[in-house]
Amino acid sequence: MDDSVAAYDFFAPPLIRFGAGRIDEIGEMVGLWGRRAWIVGGTASLERSGAQQRIDASLSAAGIESRVVARSTGEPTVDQLAAALAGLQHEDLDGVVVVAVGGGSTIDLAKALAALATNMPIDQRTGIDLDTFVVDHLEGVGRGLAIRQWPLPMVAVPTTAGTGAEATRNAVISCPRRRFKKSMRSPMMVPRAALVDPDLTASCDSSTIAASGLDCVTQLIESFVCRFAKPLPRCLVLESLPRALHSLPRLLMPKPADDDPRRWIDSRAADRVALSHAALLSGLALTNSGLGLAHGVAAALGVACGTPHGVACAVMLPAALRVNREAVQDEFAQLERAVDPSAPRDVATAADAFVERIERLCLESGVPRRLSELGVTADQIDWLAEHSGGASMRGNPVQLATEELRCLLAAML
């Protein structure tokens, strides 16, 4: 065994509070950084999760003034972000803390809003082209401007268990008009605090649980085998992936017709805790190591077909495992033994068992299996192959040429 450890950086929220019922502490947390809360919520996540009243009460008790300044509608777009910025252009930023309550899309919108609010030149706020301003801060498009001023302090409160956006240093923003999906990225964009209350995920339906849960699983696996994987994120994966793989199927079990809904929800509390914790750790792992093929293609699928991110990852995960099987069989075997200590000692056999385990999970979760089920047509394959790139694809263990990727995607129609 090589005992050397290469130099690495590690990014994480300075404060993480995890546990059921901790949403009632949001007022105290916001008060650490300010006295006014700008809340960014999802279309219905604030109400459906049961968080709205408890957040309002906690903020009020702490003497924090609050108001909802934006709501995400699906995955955040340049237009949504520009519109949110337009409504806040002339606001006083003193004492403001951005509070994101929702899924990964909501948290990403809030991260980008918090970053651009402080990086907008004061002398240009009137009359600035906000559309161009947003694009110029995204990777690979526009002028590639960096985030130079610290964003507004931000507290991320996830209401789904999957994306890990509460722990990452980027925000994914798409633009259907220009046909791209790109990241705004900076170490300064890591939320100042993450409050992860698994109770807030209790209202998620089975399709949301499946998509977000498989996104979490994909992030854990890809960050573990990524070409740029770091030792500390790998430790987090070994701790959390077994919990995710054990809890997700139980959360997807249909409720017996004669069971009381409240009792059924309560009986799955431990599984919600396990999956929420795995999602948090998946965010820490991906932002400090990287991802791979499934995420690289998922971004292009979101642009071409409007496929929700978690669903796209779930469709691509089995194919990504097969592509990388020979290159990282030792790592796959290690993951299988973490999940099942009685796994075969033979590396190849254990690696195959892991791939089969994940394929079975995807099948049983009920997510689509073919690209055609997402609306992909044969004439879109070339475009998908050419636009499935970026940082995620660079991290894939096996580097695929565009033609190789095209053949892979064509075979998945």
Image (tube, rainbow, N blue to C red):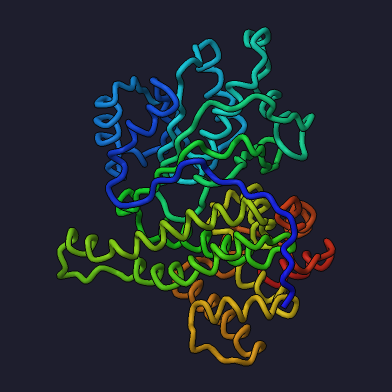
Quadrant for residue 177, please give it: top right
Q: Is residue 373 left or right of residue 322?
A: left
Whether residue 82 is visible here, answered yes or no, is yes
Q: Is residue 156 left or right of residue 377?
A: left
Front one among 67 and 288: 288
| Residue occupying the point 70% across, 63% down | 226
Quadrant for residue 63, please give it: top left
How many numbered discs? 0
22, above or below 134, in the image: below
| Image position, residue 260 (x, y; %) | 15, 63
| Residue occupying the point 57% across, 39% down | 190
| Residue occupying the point 63% across, 56% down | 298
Whether residue 379 is visible here, answered yes or no, is no
Quadrant for residue 136, please give it: top right
Front one among 65 and 140: 65
293, above or below 174, in the image: below
Residue extending furthest front? 3
| Residue occupying the point 54% across, 52% down | 308
Q: Is residue 186 left or right of residue 273?
A: right
308, above or below 182, in the image: below
| Image position, residue 141 (x, y; %) | 77, 36
| Image position, residue 368 (x, y; %) | 53, 66
389, above or below 365, in the image: above
| Image position, residue 102 (x, y; %) | 42, 42
- The quarter in which the C terminus is drawn is bottom right
Q: Is residue 354 left or right of residue 134?
A: left
- The quarter in which the N terminus is drawn is bottom right
